[in-house]
Amino acid sequence: MLDEEKGSLLIIVEGDGPPLVSGPMPRARRNIAAGTFYHVLNRGNGQRRLFYKDRDYLAFVRVLAEGLERYRVDLLAWCLMPNHWHLVLRPRDAPALSRLMGWVGVTHVRRHHQHYHTRGGGHLYQGRFKSFPVQDDRHFRTVCRYVEANARRAGLVRRAEQWGWSSLAQPPAPTPESRPWPKTSEWPMSKPHDWLDRVNEPLSKQEREALQTSVIRGRPFGQADWVADTAKRLNLTHTLRDPGRPPKKPKQPKPTK
């Protein structure tokens, strides 16, 4: 089953009140397939920081955990960074992914503005979330390595497991006031016994370039035949073309005199 997004609603959060919703805004159609893995990410507007202190990270983690209890989406891996975040998700029904991310985004923005008293201070995020499908084989493991190694790659920690805001981290000790920590679901294959060592090893140049292309273009990430089939099935064939180069039109035969 597919979920087709043909337009978005402009949602404006004003203080404690309900979101103000305008008419639909044009956007590229996004088809979501139930049971497919997705790398989902978003960034602060203009590289703006999303998280300044531990309580900011914890607030987002709690919003994410609440959202996962509301919507039928599995979480496989995640990492929060100062100005962006990454999630690896699998919707159990097609509309659930967009509904989860819409709820998480609106709720996080509202709570952020309430805490920092920044009502009317501009957009927190650069736009709607980005996502691309991931094949459930070694490409899935590559994406999870990439996600969980973000803090190490950015030089925030020496080893990825030392970063407290990812699926590698140990959840804080529960207290009477504590809220749920995001629960990760079982992988489609067994996790290698040396997973931590793999996460802390740099990706190959080929893996890194292919992932960066998928992030920028929204291109499915997997083996070539799977990518082509998935792009056709989910209306993502435009992600396979080089940017700025329209598809060639077939030459028309010259009329005979």
Image: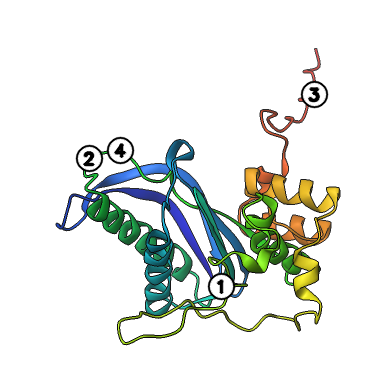
Can the viewer see residue 137?
A: no
Residue 31 percent across, percent down from the top left: 54, 58
Q: Which residue is farthest top?
A: 257
The residue identified by callout 4 is 122
Look at the numbered disc 4 and give the secondary structure of its residue: loop
C-beta proximity under 8 Å, tags 1 and 3? no
The quadrant holding residue 90 is: bottom right
Residue type beneath disc 4: Gly
| Amino acid type, residue under disc 2 in the picture | Gly
- Disc 2/disc 3 C-alpha distance (Å): 58 Å
Q: Residue furthest front?
A: 158
Q: In this rendering, is residue 167 above or below 226?
A: below
Query: Which residue type does callout 1 highlight?
Result: Ala
Q: In this image, 74 relative to 202: left or right?
A: left
Q: CA distance from mark 3 to mark 4?
A: 54 Å
In the picture provided, is 17 more to the left or to the right than 137? left
Q: Nearer the viewer, mark 2 or mark 1?
A: 2
Badge 2, how many Cα within 10 Å: few under 14, some, many 20+? Answer: few
Q: Is residue 91 visible?
A: yes
Q: Position of residue 51 (x, y in %)?
A: 43, 53
Residue highlighted by disc 1: 34
Callout 4 environment at 10 Å: few (<14), some (14 to 19), or many (20+)? few
Q: Residue at 26% of width from left, 45% of height from top? A: 23
Q: Mark 1 or mark 4: which comes first in sequence?
A: 1
Query: Disc 1 to disc 4, how far (Cα)?
Result: 34 Å
Question: Where is the C terminus found, in terms of image quarters?
Answer: top right
Residue 192, placed above or below residue 5: below
